[in-house]
Amino acid sequence: MECRILSIQSHVVRGYVGNKSATFPLQVLGFEVDSINSVQFSNHTGWFCLFRVERNPKMDTVPHSYIWYCKDKSFLEVVVSIIQELKKATPGLVYVCDPVMGDHGLLYVPENLLPVYKNEVVPLADILTPNQFEAELLTGRKIKTEDDAVEVMDLLHEMGPDTVVLTSTDLPSKHGDQFLVALGSQKTNGTSSSQKICMDIPQVDAVFVGTGDLFAAMLLAWTHHHPKDLKTAFEKTVSVMQHVVKRTFTYANEMAGPGNKPSAAQLELRMIQSKADIENPSVVVEAKVLQKSSHQKQ
């Protein structure tokens, strides 16, 4: 079955951000991608929300996925209305949302977007990918321990999504401060029980642009291929990221020369050079399955 994606996000002339960061990897994985550029810049550091539409057998051509960049309240409310209409028209629709609001205690968006996300967007989402700060904003709970993270993911499940991924947290890793802890949770066959996973992700000492867009696109792709196996989908997504980022970091340091800090231009993602790793990633980071949780509300 053909899988077609309509990608609506920013475009950059140079580098890999927005549509430039998502389109090629998705095509490599067999998705047809129709791109609409919401804006066109020389460079851009925006993020986006994701949702996927399953094929309607009554239609010859329909996008399987839409990718949105959400910036202000009025636009976000339009997205909500579109999702509501699509869910009514297409029972199999799966909505993937990255609720981009901020990180490390800093809001990137106006405060009036929070109630829209909390009361309108999240209840529609099937897959939700907040960072720790965004998850805390949505639930009103602080994450200081792994148990806190599990509780927050369960609370987010109760708000609507069947799958929740905390893409980054401030939790300490058993491997040291060079690792980032991420967690995920997927409800089991629509029941109140869920599988929880945890992953320690190696960090690279550099600032990259477009990695968030690539992560979201890869999670969209691999959850499509492994809809009931979050562990595998997350491992493949993060492994793609590791291959691309490490290849980029190695290239940037070679170009900068010994003792020199790579420039932003030298740190542009080596996307084309990573084609084989995107298409068939060797798993270099494995997720740990935590104890299953069954204390969610029925």
Image (cartoon, rainbow, N blue to C red):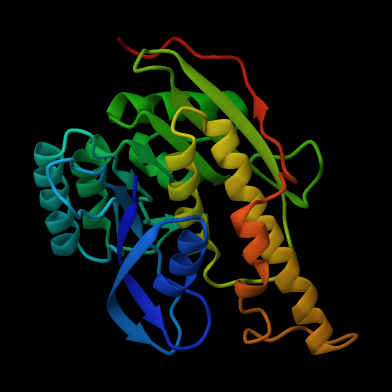
- What is the tally of numbered marks visible in this picture? 0
Q: Looking at the image, which residue is at 37% across and 38% down?
A: 127
Q: Looking at the image, which residue is at 20% across and 55% down?
A: 61
167 up-or-down from 108: above or below = above
Outermost residue on the right side: it is 258
Quarter of the image where one finds residue 254: bottom right
Q: Looking at the image, which residue is at 77% across and 78% down?
A: 251
220 up-or-down from 190: above or below = below
Residue 162, given in percent of the width and then of the height, sits at 36, 28
Left or right of residue 219, residue 172 in this image: right
Left or right of residue 137, residue 238 in this image: right
Residue 52, given in percent of the width and then of the height, sits at 30, 47
Looking at the image, can residue 63 be seen? Answer: yes
246 up-or-down from 113: above or below = below
Question: Considering depth in this image, is 48 or 168 the residue closer to the camera?
Answer: 48
116 up-or-down from 266: above or below = above
Q: Quadrant of the N terminus?
A: top left
Q: Looking at the image, which residue is at 37% across and 56% down?
A: 101
Looking at the image, can residue 170 be seen? Answer: no
Residue 143, given in percent of the width and then of the height, sits at 53, 35
Q: Quadrant of the C terminus?
A: top left
Left or right of residue 59, residue 135 in this image: right
